[in-house]
Amino acid sequence: MGVFDLYSKRQRRLKGGIPEIYAYDEIPQPLRVQIIHVMQDALGTPIDYIKFRRVRDAIDFIVSTLRREYGLFELLPKKGHRSRDIPTELYDFILDETNHERVLDAIEISFRIIDKFTREVYYKNDNSASEKADEALNELNVRFREHAIGYQFEAGLIVRVDSQLLHSEVVRPALAILHDEAYAGAEEEYHAAYEHYRHGHMKDALISALKALESTIKVIAKKRNWALPENATATPLVGLMFEKKLIPEFWAKHFSGLRSMLESGVPTVRNKMGGARSGC
């Protein structure tokens, strides 16, 4: 269905009523309801769950994955004595779970499934399935922004947005590049780094961040047929990029600080903090 620009929204904008500072540790109830509407359009309703095998497979996968990861037989206790089907269990969890990170877990895995598995016509016998998947991903991000909740769904991952400008000009283009199949390893390491960071595992985040940096440079080197030292680590890899003038020479002075940071910053911090893996 998409986003409708209601009169009340326009009035809030005119009055400056939309906050510019993002919140991160809450998912408001109206936003949860809107996200469920989006999910039901693209992923499936309880009725779709009965009618279509692929809808059952998708929703069963989401719920069983969350149950297993949390060590639960049910995502939330039943309300009263009423029976609850699997889709309702998922949607009730998004509505009622008090831990905002677990809500984001459910949203992230659900929209990964929407992005990867609901696009085929046979998912719900719908010729516009791919367009609806795109609409769902777009609407999710619009709803986050409307409520000033500092997260976006990018390249299969819920990522924190600290600055909309920084996100649109730096984070999103970087994620788009990593989403290319050639950078699959680097993308996986980046996602791992972000997950560690999100859960406060800083040492593990630094280890994965360095791996992502090294993997990205190796892919670039391979594409350009550059000879690489065996088992090359960050410092010689970054040195190679400057040696090969991947960054134009007339920008060299401007990037001298960047080079120092890349060569010694992340690797040094990784070695000092992440060499011995934490028990976080």
Image (cartoon, helix red, strand yellow):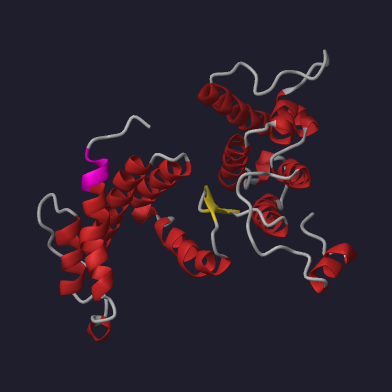
The answer to whether residue 225 is visible is no
Image quadrant of residue 111?
Answer: top right
The residues colored magenta run 271-275
In percent of width and height, residue 241 lies at 21, 69
Image quadrant of residue 90?
Answer: top right
Image quadrant of residue 218?
Answer: bottom left
Name the outermost residue toward the bottom: 250
In percent of width and height, residue 280 lies at 38, 32
Which part of the image, by quadrant, shows the N terminus? Answer: bottom right
Q: Residue at x 80, y 20 (%)?
A: 79
Q: Nearer the viewer, residue 170 or 179?
A: 170
In percent of width and height, residue 38 lies at 73, 47
Name the outermost residue toward the top: 81
| Image position of 101 (left or right of 94) | left
Q: Is residue 258 above or below residue 175?
A: below
Q: Is residue 24 above or below residue 171?
A: above
Q: Residue at x 28, y 83 (%)?
A: 251
In percent of width and height, residue 182 lies at 34, 55
| Image position of 116 (left or right of 218) | right
Q: Nearer the viewer, residue 265 or 138?
A: 265
Q: Residue at x 77, y 70 (%)?
A: 16
Q: Residue at x 34, y 51 (%)?
A: 186
Name the outermost residue toward the right: 7
